[in-house]
Amino acid sequence: MPDLPSQWTPVALVADLPVATSAGTVLQGAEVVIWRDSAGRVHAWEDRCPHRGMKLSFGFVRGDRIACLYHGWQYDGAGVCRYIPAHPELEVPASICVPAHAAAEALGMVWVAAAGTDPGSLPPGGAEPLRSLFVEAPLEVLVGLAQAGLPGAGAVTEARRDGALLHLSQGGTRIAAGMHPMGPGAAALHLVLPAGASEDRRLALVTAAAGLRRAAEAAAGTGEAA
Amino acid sequence: MPMLRTVTLRFEGHLPEASFAEFAAHRAARLSLPHAILMQDAGAAVIRLTGPAALIDAFEMALSLGPADCLVREVRRQDNAPPTME
């Protein structure tokens, strides 16, 4: 399993991971399942059932467990297999487990890191989701363009990188973009806003974000026009 | 209380020794099955295991499929001792 970095990285918007759901993502080539149990806790693990290698992100959440879609093996919040439907009488050994990463929520985003990473370095505060922007381009290409602002969304008065965040002030709106390197040719920005932005402004920013994606993919030679 | 068995499995086929032994050790550890490789060469391996029947079945299935550079053509199974209670 590729190790996750020991720095926190945003991989999704909190709003895109409702209670009792799972989702798959990729961080620097490592496939990760993020899931939220019925109590609202977020988990991040290797996205692979130890039984047959099926992606756990295709599984289903029941209570405080996630079950593999393939044969229904159930794992508790620590990643330990607790129940095998084909052998309901079996006391499952604790060695059947999924490698778990660190997971946290901050600034409207889901963050992951190597197990044991200190949550003290996460950014404080909350935010409202705008959208996640998935782009077929290297992160540095995407961020390099984003630092000039979202196309057509007003004048940029601040563009500052701070760890895994890009802070923009553009057209009177403060935007935080979580920088998510997925692999050599793929990246995402998870965009959030302070509370109170109007619907018209939010729509304009979503449209501008799509323009940023087209520009980044054109620059990387991967877009529709390439 | 699970019923424990001691079983000897003989795998035959194309079995590169290093990768087959490593795969067997990994799967046995994953399933918490004490195991011993009683004999191994490039064409066969004999492994003795003790544990719940369901986990021994899972071990047999896993090794009959892999690792990728091996081709298991036949598995022979022998119960070595009567079932015991843990």
Image (spheres, coloured by chain):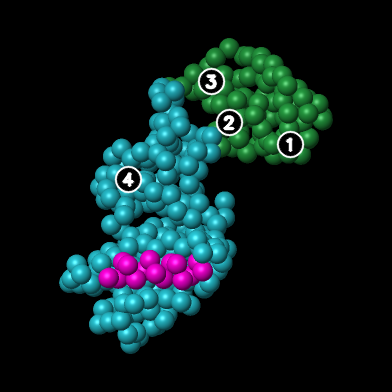
Q: Colour of chain B?
A: green
Q: Is residue B56 above or below residue A15?
A: above
Name the kind of residue labelled 4 in the image: Thr
Disc 4 and disc 3 on one polypeptide chain: no
Q: Nearer the viewer, mark 4 or mark 3?
A: 4
- Which label's residue is closer to the chain start, 3 or 2? 2
Mark 4–mark 1 contact, CB under 8 Å?
no
Type of the residue with mark 2: Leu
Name the side, left or right, on which B22 lies relative to A38. Answer: right
Q: Which residue is mark 3?
A: B53
The reply to whether label 3 and label 2 mark residues of one chain is: yes
| Residue behind mark 2 | B33
Read off the chain for label 1. Answer: B
* Chain A as rendered: colour: cyan
Residue where numbered disc 1 is placed: B69
The reply to whether label 4 and label 2 mark residues of one chain is no
In this rendering, do the residues under marks 1 and 3 share a single chain? yes
Residue A117 appears in the picture as rendered = no
Q: Amino acid at mark 3?
A: Ala
The residues colored magenta run: A204-218
Q: Main secondary structure of the magenta part?
A: helix
Picture residue at 81% right of the left edge, 26% below the top: B43
Q: Chain of mark 2?
A: B
